[in-house]
Amino acid sequence: MLWLFCFIDRANIGNARIAGMDDSLELRGYDYNFILSCFYIPYILLEMPATILCKRIGPGWFIPTTALLFGICSFATAFVKTRAQMCALRFLLGVFEAGMLPGIAYYLSCWYKRAELAFRLSLYLVMSPLAGAFGGILASGILRLGHFGSLTQWRMIFGIEGIITIALSVLSYATLTDRPETAIWLSSEEKYLCKLRLKLEHAGQTEAINTIDRAKLWRGVMNPITLSTAVVFLFSNITVQGLGVFLPTIISTIYPEASTIQRQLYSVPPYIVGALFDVFVPALSWKLDRRQIFIVISTPTIIVGYILFLASHSTTVRYVACYLIASTAFVAGPLSSAQVSANVASDTSRTSAIATNVLFGNIGGLVSSWTYLVKDAPDYTIGNGLNLACAFMQLVVSLGTLLWLRRDNKKREGRNVVQDLAGLDKQEIEYLDWKHPLHALCGDNPMQLKATTKGNGRGATELLLAAIKGYLPIAKQLLELGAEIDAPRADTPGRTALEGAAEHGGLGMVQFLLENGAQTFGDGVWQYY
């Protein structure tokens, strides 16, 4: 609900525009586009600092506080008298909303595993298209009131929606918690399980809660998947933010004879279609444990939609194009955030990866504020052409990322974990982050961990090699990642990790394997008395 009204408070300026805001504030030429840009400048610049602050103080305090502040800004917008005042409040709105999207994405990544995250992200990002639909319905209902206290016309939209946001933010102080370990509604066993589920996916990580490490921040930013996915989200968000702010204006050019309330309502159905796809596609992604391929295949419908806008002047065709574009335009939001989160290991690098993705996306939002210009009306050839080019680039970059992922994972499958980590201490292994040889990058065909098959070209398993060399931390990580503790060599029967430990690895390794359920020794069963 917080994200719903976060997006409404950002996009309701589009509803206010067709309700008389331009005439009331005497906006001319590019004034409207300039006002939109005032929001995105602080939104982009403060994205990373706000996300780091969210990790530092905890999402349970950070998210409600930012929601309260941007709700106050939205309410105050109802009382502006000049363009300068509107610009100032849009600037402050950008300041306070900067950490909301990456903050919630980071918060959910503290609870859910890789495969689960995309669908969970979609359950809150679906509020983006629903904000367009609900915002249109709410705006039409508000305009029927006639007045709200001293507020009339478009001012009521900002005033009433701002009050709702403030109320929700106050309520969220009592409902949000920082992370599973501090959730009062979970038992101690459930808290431990939540923590363990995530730890098993991130090899070598022992990071303390609420700590910031610059090296890990940089790891998250410079991950190739973070950067390529962020570029995809940049192109995608040009379309998404353009839809959020300009769809009521586009509808006005398709149905110029319709009343203001009818235009508000015409914008609702495309958003509803977008909301349905925004849940369905990530749900399918969750079931199949694939993300990148769905980012790729969600793009063609957007391309077709903008081609129809450019090729036809038919009212029906152009309105159908709105549905095609809205259907999959919003999908990249949850999928991209889930993808960058899944492809880093530590909590800190996950924070910076999500922030980088959202930062690039909001650069796209800034561009979107200048895609539909007054001089380009009513066909908006420039805006539709730019969005078509962006959709094509989204397809090219996402497809290239998919192919790179397949290639990189194939290379990782042939690596020898024990040799790669030999000589590294615990901190050095932790700083490897996504470069850790057991960290599989998540593409269309995630790396199949070779923890139970050949490790050195002679048939030995990775666990056997670790046992022979006495590398206890590596053996522990292999078991956490699903290595079969009694898996024999591939080329000769018998030889298990327990036998290797008994011969070469030392008493500590033998005891560790026995405590973790090892039984097979040679060709028989090891009896531990």
Image (cartoon, helix red, strand yellow):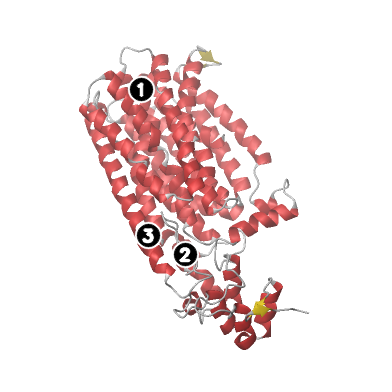
Looking at the rendered structure, the secondary structure element under dot 1 is helix
| Rendered location of residue 195, percent (x, y) | 64, 57
Mark 2: few/some/many CA within 10 Å (<14, 14-19, 20+): many
Answer left or right for 51 relative to 249.
right
Q: Quadrant of residue 38?
A: top left
- The residue lying toward the viewer, choosing from 411 and 192, is 411
Query: Disc 3 vs disc 1: Cβ atoms closer than 8 Å?
Result: no
Tag 3 residue: 406
Mark 1: few/some/many CA within 10 Å (<14, 14-19, 20+): some
Dot 2 amino acid type: Trp
Looking at the rendered structure, the secondary structure element under dot 3 is helix
- On the question of residue 78 being in view, the answer is no
Dot 1 amino acid type: Asp
Dot 3 amino acid type: Arg
| Rendered location of residue 397, percent (x, y) | 31, 51
Mark identifier at residue 434: 2
Q: Earlier in the sequence, mark 2 or mark 1?
A: 1
Tag 1 residue: 22
Figure quadrant of the N terminus: top right
Q: Residue at x 33, y 20 (%)?
A: 252
Mark 3: few/some/many CA within 10 Å (<14, 14-19, 20+): some
Report, in whole angstroms, how far the alpha carbon at label 2 lies from the one at label 1.
Answer: 50 Å
Figure quadrant of the C terminus: bottom right
Note whether 204 is above or below 75 in the view shown: below
Mark 3 or mark 1: which is in front? Answer: 3
| Rendered location of residue 525, percent (x, y) | 69, 77
Answer left or right for 78 relative to 302.
right
Q: Earlier in the sequence, mark 3 or mark 1?
A: 1
Mark 2 or mark 3: which is in front? Answer: 3
Q: Earlier in the sequence, mark 2 or mark 3?
A: 3
